[in-house]
Image (cartoon, rainbow, N blue to C red):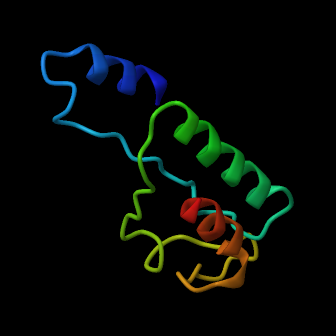
């Protein structure tokens, strides 16, 4: 993440591009998943990410730790949404 941001900032057009953070959705609800995901987001923001990218795999293909499909409004995601709001 930091390498991408540094590259953009040192480029000829530093104001044309932005970097978004990602979350590894699979395994949500498992031990330590929320803490790890929030820490990753906080690090990405500290390194220059301006937001959170929500790809369509969330809600379609991502699975919770118990093997069920992870829904966008699942309560296990509350720490992510809270962190993303800042």
| Residue 79 x/y as whole percent | 71, 67
Hey, which quadrant is residue 81 in on the image?
Answer: bottom right
Q: Is residue 63 above or below residue 27?
A: below
Drawn side of residue 11 relative to residue 44, left or right: left
| Number of callouts | 0
Hey, which quadrant is residue 6 in on the image?
Answer: top left
Q: Name the residue: 56% across, 61% down.
A: 84
Drawn side of residue 7 relative to residue 51, left or right: left
Q: Is residue 39 above or below residue 24?
A: above
| Residue 20 x/y as whole percent | 39, 47
| Residue 60 x/y as whole percent | 43, 79
Q: Is residue 85 above or below residue 49?
A: below
Q: Name the residue: 60% across, 48% down.
A: 41
In the image, farthest residue toward the right: 31
Q: Is residue 7 above or below residue 25?
A: above
User: In front: 17, or 22?
Assistant: 17
Q: Name the residue: 41% across, 64% down.
A: 54
Q: Name the residue: 57% across, 54% down.
A: 24
| Residue 25 x/y as whole percent | 58, 62
Hey, which quadrant is residue 31 in on the image?
Answer: bottom right
In the picture, the quarter occupied by the C terminus is: bottom right
Drawn side of residue 59 relative to residue 43, left or right: left
Drawn side of residue 6 relative to residue 34, left or right: left
């Amino acid at each position: 993440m930091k390498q991408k941001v540094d590259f953009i900032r040192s480029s000829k057009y530093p104001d044309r591009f932005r970097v978004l953070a990602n979350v590894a959705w699979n395994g949500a609800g498992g031990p330590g998943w929320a803490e790890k995901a929030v820490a990753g987001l906080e690090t990405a923001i500290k390194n220059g990410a301006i937001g959170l990218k929500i790809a369509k795999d969330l809600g379609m293909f991502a699975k919770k730790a118990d093997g069920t499909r992870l829904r966008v409004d699942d309560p296990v995601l509350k720490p992510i949404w809270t962190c993303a709001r800042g």
